[in-house]
Structure formats: C-alpha cells, structure tokens
Image: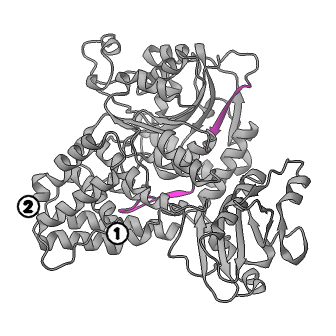
Amino acid sequence: MIRTDMISTVGRAYLTSNIENDEYSYPKAFSTSSLTFVPIRNSAGRAFEKLDIRFVKDNVTVLIETKQNFTKADEEQLSAYVEYEKALTGNKTVAILANTVNDNVKVWRGVVSDSDFMPKETALRSMDEYVDFYTSKINDKEKVMQNTYKLNELLHRHSIPEKLRSQFVGTCLLALKNGLDYSTPSLTAAQIRTRVKEVLEELLNSDINKAEKLALLNRNVLGDQYIRQLNIAAFREILKFIEDNILPFINDKSTSGQDLLNLFFVTFNKYVGKSDKNQAFTPDHITDFMSKITGVNKHSVVLDPCCGSGSFLVRAMTQALDDCATASEQERVKKYQIFGIEFDENVYGLATTNMLIHSDGNSNIRQGSCFDLADWIKEAKPNVILMNPPYNGQRIHLPKSYVNTWSKDKKEDPSKGLYFVKYIADTLNSINHQAKLAVLLPVACAIGTSGEIARLKREILEENTLDAVFTLPNEIFYPGASASACCMVFKIGTKHNDVSNPDTFFGYCKDDGFKKKKNLGRVEQIDTDTGKSKWVEIEREWIELYRNRRSVDGLSATHKVNGDDEWLCEAYMKTDYTKLTEQDFQQTINDYLAYLVKEGHIYEA
C-alpha cells in the first residue's frame, strides 16, 4: 500500500507531520518542546530520527514506519520511535510496520515486544478504531455479561457448585487461551484435566511459589469431586461454550480486552450463594477511576492487601504497562511492581488465574492475612495502595490485638474496614515511606463521628492526610453487596494538619452513567446524541474536578476537616438549584405525605 492510501485509511485529519513528505522529525519535535533529544542508535551507529507517518487523537499516537518489505531487524527502528513518543507526549501508542509493495502490516499495541504484538491485526484500521484499542467497547461488555449468565446456567445443569464456578471457568479459559486441545475424539475427561494441569505448570514455571499455587489449583479445581465427575461430553460442552462465547470477546492485548476479562470475573462472581451475598467485588470502571486518581504509571509499585480476584492489580498493571516505552520496562512492572495479598484460599486461586491470563508471573501475590505480612509489605515499599477491604470482617480476619478490644457480643469489625487503612498506613510510616492510598469503604465510615470509627479517623490523620472523598453511586456493587460506598484517598506519611496541605476535596459522584439491567447487573450507557459512553465523559469530569480542586454546586466541594467531622460531600456541597424540576418538588411533597400517613399524623379520607 502506498503512503497516501495509508494516510487516507487511518485518517488525514489526524496526521501530524512537521517536515516535508508527511514525515515527522523527533529531533525537531523535542527542540520545539524545549526537551533534550538523545538519539537511539543501532549496532552500526545509525541514529533513528525521522518517522514516516504519525497520527494523534486524544492521548493516542499511531506510528507507522514504511518499508518495501519489512524484516525483524526493522522492529528496532520502530521501537526507538515508541520511546521517543513516550518521552515527548506520554501518549499511549499503536506501532505499525507497513509494506509499500503489498498490504502486509505488523501491529503492536504499546511497545514493540512479543507480549504487545497483535497477530490478528493484518490490515490498517481507522484512527477511531486504534483509539478503541485503549477504550471500552460497551456492546462487547454486554455480550460477555449475557454469555456469562448463560454459562452459569450450563454449569448449574452439570452440577458445578456456585463457589467453584469462577475458578473452574477461569482455569478453563486460561488453558484455552494457551492452546488446550479438547476436541480429539480419543481424549478422556481425565486426559483433558491432565492437559490443563500441564498448561498451568508451564505458565508458573518461573514462579517461586509455583508448588503452592499448583497444589491449590489442583486441590480446589481440577481435583474437586464435582469436576472429576464431569463426563467427556459435559466437559467438551463447557469448554466449547467458553471458547465460542467468552474467549472471542477477550483480547488481553488491548485495554478493552483487559476490561472485558476483568468484567467476566466480576460478573461471574456475582452468582454466589446466600452466605457470600455481602462480597463487594469492585466494578471495573471504579478500579480504573481509582488507578487514575492515584496516578499509577510505570514507576508505581502497587499493593492491594485484600486483592480478591485481582481486579485492582489487573487494572494497575494495565495502566502501568501503557506508560512503558520498552519491553524491559514492561517486564520490570510485571515482575517487581505489582503486589497482592488475599486471605481466602479459593479467591486467591482466582487471583492467580486472573493474573496468569494477563501474562503476569504473579509471583508477588501471597495467600494469607495482610496483618501477618508486615515485613513483606515493608520490603515491597509500595507507593500506591488500592484496596476494597471487607466491611464485615470476622474475628478470624483481624489481628488478635485489635479483636481483643471488641465487646464480647461483637461479631464483626466495628470499624467497617477502616482498621485496614490504619494498619497499612502505620506499616509504611514505620519505615518513613510515603504513598498514596485509595480505598473503598462504606459510607458509615465517612459519616461516623463516634465510637471506633471516629477514633480511627482521628488516629489516621495524626500521620496521614485525607486528600479526597468521593461519594459513589447507590448500589455500586449490585447485584453483590448492598452497601453504599465512598472512595477515600489518603496521602500516607504526610500529616493532615501540615500547613502545605490544601483543604480536602469532596466529590458527589452519584451518577456514573450505569443503569441496572435484569440478569446483567449495572450496565454502561451510551449517550444517544454522541453515540459515546456516558461513563467516559463522567470520569473525565470527576478527575478534572479533583485535580483542580474545583467546587461546583451539586458536584463537588473543598473543606477543612478533622477526625471528628463527617467526611462526605453532602455535608459541604452547595445545591445546584438550576437542575431542580417541578417533578422533583412533587416527588418531595409525595414522600413527605407518605411519611405523615405512615406515622399516623394524618389520615387518608
């Protein structure tokens, strides 16, 4: 394909050339931005400086290097341009080698590495489609959710217990993603289980905790009596459904693929027994939001001390990898910068599988209590903590020194999870290590002004800063836990009363553009006027208000607070009366009349 056709296909409106022939000079671009350009050279000493074609839209750059017939050696040159682009703009990148004598292309989402190579991309796309590599696709998400619901019914029909389903399906998905053969007629169900085990062994080859994790997956999944009782026909039916109806929608080479895979686990875990109905699996768009407001990048060392199925870790890793410019930077993120702890053995297995599907060695995920791993946490020295601790922790989940302070009739954590924040903050402060912590907690923690919650709020602020609190939508965990939640952001290691601290930011984020839908949970909505996701624009507004600490009636406020105050936007935000309608007034009157009737103050005629 000739260059002009390439430009037309991607979109001339997004072409950004700064020298003749539609080329782009990085030395010139660096000079214009008052940056120092350090050329990258090949083994012969040749400096790579001028890219053939460059496109930009929003925060995504598409780089195309053209050759008559590209070879493996040309990847070094393209890789240099990705490094330049990251240093110049920090944009997310799509890097392409394209032939001029035919239509052959080679595409990478991110850096030029084996892990970011996209073998199914065999033709040029439009710029909007390349931007979609980094944004969610709503229809695909709904399709995964619909198919997950059908898969749940299939597993129920084959007598797979609810608590086993997520881990079993995740293990099958991992094996299928790595080429599991299950259709050969001569195979037995036992032989398929053996092949799945072999896939796991290969993937965990470089993991120092390999034996422990394999034993766990074998015991809790492949060796479970309900899996062993599956006959070959049932096993094949389940595997084929996953291969045909789940796997096609999951592309872990793109952000949308990462989102869909995480959504799969979160959605599937909502089909649980009554005993687990208070599990608060974090919605994917909230993990995305929290990763962004904490500024996760390639330099971040991230810890989730209650990691569950690994949703925060997956999102943080994805965001960090998007910030990388080289394959070596990506490997460093995967091996040394993502840490997780999970108490529940079964859920820990799910986190292991989830991270493996995302091509991570997951050697830094531990099974146990975070309260027993203080030294491990100190050694990791995380500078970003993302967490959603249990709100109703039992005595077994918390340290004895804390449990002994409870009254004898108390069965659940009186702090509603706030003690986890205090513990992590104290652990990092003991080594004078600063970090940013974002945590999901029930609204009760924000409005509590007495008892255990108030005590912990005061103690946390002695050495740490309450940077922000976001009130989140009602039923954010639907159809899982029913708790109303907020997101608190702390600066660990900076005293709250430090004179340099601005007032705490409070955001009223009740509308995230999601609506409840039967059998699907809360579903992302599309703006009928623009055809775009409502959430994308809402998230952008939330982040802009927070970063600029702007007070907007009905949306946000800033206020100086202490441990005895309410930590919720509703206490300080001004009402936006311009949005009130006659219907709002009528509804308030109706609610008040209903209240009077209920209390017996007035009687219906």
Q: Mark 1 = which residue? A: 147
Q: Position of residue 325 (x, y in %)?
A: 65, 53
| Numbered mark located on residue 229 in the image | 2
Q: Residue at image x 55%, y 76%? A: 121
Residue 505 colored in magenta in the image = yes
Label 2: few (<14), some or many (≥20) within 10 Å?
Answer: some
Q: Label 1 amino acid?
A: Asn
How many marks overall? 2
Query: Front-most of 127 and 21?
Result: 21
Residue 53 falls left or right of residue 532 = right
Q: CA distance from mark 2 to mark 1?
A: 24 Å
Q: Label 2 amino acid?
A: Gln
Q: What residue range appears in magenta?
A: 502-522
Report helix, strand or loop for mark 1: helix
Which of the marked residues, 2 or 1, is nearer the chain's N terminus? Answer: 1
Picture quarter with the N terminus: bottom right
Q: Quadrant of residue 198?
A: bottom left
Report helix, strand or loop for mark 2: loop
Residue 225 colored in magenta in the image = no
Residue 308 falls left or right of residue 60 = left
Residue 150 falls left or right of residue 261 = left
Q: Which residue reaches farthest front?
A: 44
